[in-house]
Amino acid sequence: QVQLVESGGGLVQAGGSTRLSCAASGPIFSINAMGWYRQAPGKQRELVASITSRTSTNYADSVKGRFTISRDNAKNTVYLQMNSLKPEDTAVYYCNVDARVILVGTREYWGQGTQVTVSS
């Protein structure tokens, strides 16, 4: 069974930085796209950033120039470096992985979510 374990986040002051990590484990043959989503209270979950297997990246307009997504294929891990944080970045951040799993095929998996709170 594939598991995604997220780490990082917590309470950060406005203007500060933090980094999220998400490590995938299990019978993974290969990982295609990896990404981060977030959901603020009362709002829908939205894409923050994604990265393909060829390291092509995509960002929400609201985080462009402030957040950087990267991946370490050897560790099946995706990172989100978050700089110049704003109170409106406060949300639960979820890791998302599109993986090809042995004996299962290609499926999408979600992390448990990690809270990021930005204080003003």
Image (cartoon, grey):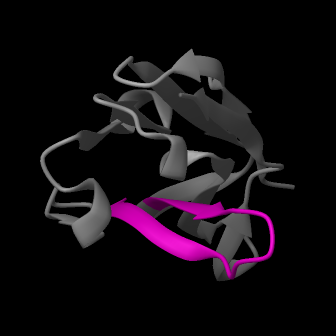
* Residue name at image x 54 percent, y 30 percent: 21
- In the image, is residue 104 above or below residue 17? below
Query: Which of 78/46 is in front?
Result: 46
Q: Residue 72 in the image: x percent, y percent? A: 34, 32
Q: Residue 103 in the image: x percent, y percent? A: 75, 73
Q: Residue 79 in the image: x percent, y percent? A: 42, 35
Q: Is residue 94 left or right of residue 80?
A: right
Over which residues does the magenta segment extend? 35-52
Query: Which of 23/94 is in front?
Result: 94
- The image shows a total of numbered marks equal to 0
- In the image, is residue 88 above or below residue 35? above
Quarter where residue 5 is shown: top right
* Residue name at image x 39 percent, y 33 percent: 85
- In the image, is residue 63 above or below residue 42? above
Query: Which of 45/1 is in front?
Result: 45
Query: Which of 52/117 is in front?
Result: 117
Quarter where residue 6 is shown: top right
Quarter of the picture containing the N terminus is bottom right
Q: Is residue 37 left or right of residue 16?
A: right
- In the image, is residue 79 above or below residue 42? above
Check residue 38 for magenta coloring.
yes
* Residue name at image x 42 percent, y 39 percent: 86
Our reading of the magenta stretch's main secondary structure is strand
Check residue 22 for magenta coloring.
no
Q: Is residue 5 left or right of residue 77?
A: right
One can see residue 51 in this view: no
One can see residue 31 in this view: yes
Q: Residue 13 in the image: x percent, y percent? A: 51, 17
